[in-house]
Structures are given as C-alpha cells and as structure tokens.
Amino acid sequence: MSTNGYPPAQNTTAASGGNGLAVGSLVLGIVGVVFAFLFSIVGLIAGIVGLVLGIIARRRAVGSRGMVLAGIVLSIIAIVIAVIFMIIGAVVATQMLNS
C-alpha cells in the first residue's frame, strides 16, 4: 500500500495494434460479402483490403487466430462473389446491347 491508501499503480502498456488488423480484416470481409451482391466494385475493394490486412495479421501472429482466419475466408468469398457478379453484369449488358 502506498501512503494514500491505494495500491501502487502498475505499468500497463498499450496494445500493439495487431488485434486491430484482425478486426479490420473481419469487418472488411463482412462488408465485402454484403456489398459484393449490391455494388460489386465496393465488395471487391473491401475484399482485397480485408485479405491484405488478414495476411499481414497472420504473418505477424497477432490477434485472435480464429478472427484472422475468418477475415481471410470472408474476404476471399467477397472477392469471388464480386468477380462473379461483375462477369454476370458484363454478360447481361452485352446481351442487352446486342439485342
């Protein structure tokens, strides 16, 4: 006990921000999947950024391993869905222009 009656303060360090990479990857993966159906380009961009953040977080081995893996998987799904919808949109637009 210190002289003021409170226990002495402990030195705590701030988190390194690594968990933020995992959270960012997960959030962008979710946003990417949702927007891949609505606005494919936004879903594609969110998926790519989420995938990059997830890979960085995995290499640094920071954050929850499950959260990082979920972010990577969701980001890949978002990229695939966005590309599929872009191809479908291009085919439909081509068919409409030809007829």
Image (spheres, rainbow, N blue to C red):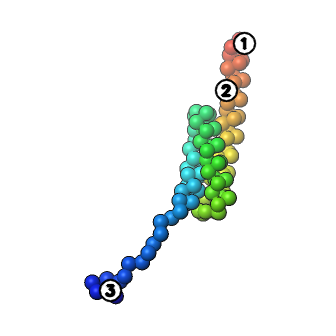
Label 2 crowd (10 A; few <14 / some 14-19 / many >=20): few
Q: Nearer the viewer, residue 82 or 63?
A: 63
User: From the viewer's perspective, is the residue at label 3 or at label 2 nearer?
Assistant: 3
Q: Amino acid at mark 3?
A: Ser
Asked whether disc 1 touches disc 2, contact meaning CB atoms under 8 Å apart, the reply is no
Mark 1 or mark 3: name the one nearer the start of the chain. 3
User: From the viewer's perspective, is the residue at label 1 or at label 3 nearer?
Assistant: 3
Coordinates of residue 34 in the picture (x, y in percent)? 58, 41
Residue at the spot x=67%, y=41% of the render?
A: 79
Q: Quadrant of the C terminus?
A: top right
Q: CA distance from mark 1 to mark 3?
A: 84 Å
Residue at the spot x=71%, y=18% of the render?
A: 94
Q: Nearer the viewer, residue 1 or 19?
A: 1
| Disc assigned to residue 31 | none
Asked whether disc 3 touches disc 2, contact meaning CB atoms under 8 Å apart, the reply is no
| Numbered marks: total | 3
Coordinates of residue 49 in the picture (x, y in percent)? 61, 44
* Residue under label 1: 98
* Residue under label 3: 2
| Disc assigned to residue 89 | 2
Residue at the spot x=53%, y=59% of the render?
A: 17
Q: Amino acid at mark 2?
A: Gly
Q: Can you name the residue that lies furthest to the top here?
A: 99
Asked whether, in this view, residue 37 is left or right of residue 99, the answer is: left
Coordinates of residue 9 in the picture (x, y in percent)? 38, 78
Mark 3 or mark 2: name the one nearer the start of the chain. 3
Asked whether, in this view, residue 47 is left or right of residue 87, the answer is: left
Label 1 crowd (10 A; few <14 / some 14-19 / many >=20): few
Image quadrant in which you'd find residue 2: bottom left
